[in-house]
Image: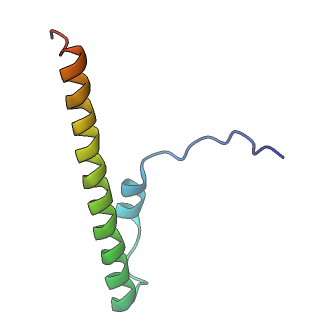
Amino acid sequence: MEEPDLPRPKGDAASRLAAEDLGPYSQAELDDRIALLEAEIARVTAHRGKAAAHRAAADALFGKPAG
C-alpha cells in the first residue's frame, strides 16, 4: 500500500527543536540530548565537507561559470 503524499512540516527540525520546552527534561535526559545534537553537528559538518569537495571537483572538471 502506498503512503499518501502528506505535506512536509513547516520549518526545519532545528527550528522545531529550538522551540521545544526543555523544562520537563531531567539533567540526564538533557545530557543525552546534548550528545545526540553534538553527533548530529558532526554528521552535518562531515556532509558539508563532502559536498564542498564534490562541488570543487565539478568546478575543476567543468569550469566555474562566470558570475
Q: In this orientation, which residue lies closer to the viewer: 2 or 26?
A: 2
The residue furthest right is 1
The residue furthest front is 61
| In this rendering, position of residue 61 left or right of residue 14 | left
Describe the colour scheme in one phrase.
rainbow
- Position of residue 15 measured from the top left corner of the image (x, y, whole percent): 37, 54
Residue lying at 19% horizontally and 14% vertically, measured from the top left: 63
| In this rendering, position of residue 18 left or right of residue 8 | left
The residue furthest left is 67
Corner quadrant of residue 53: top left
Count of numbered circles in the view: 0
Q: Work out which quarter of the rendered image holds the C terminus and state it.
A: top left
Above or below, 26 relative to 5: below
Above or below, 23 relative to 19: below
| In this rendering, position of residue 10 left or right of residue 21 | right
Corner quadrant of residue 2: top right
Residue lying at 49% horizontally and 45% vertically, measured from the top left: 10
Corner quadrant of residue 36: bottom left
- Position of residue 20 measured from the top left corner of the image (x, y, whole percent): 41, 67
Above or below, 33 relative to 51: below
Q: In this orientation, which residue lies closer to the viewer: 37 or 11?
A: 37
Q: In this orientation, which residue lies closer to the viewer: 3 or 30?
A: 3
The residue furthest top is 66
- Position of residue 5 measured from the top left corner of the image (x, y, whole percent): 69, 39
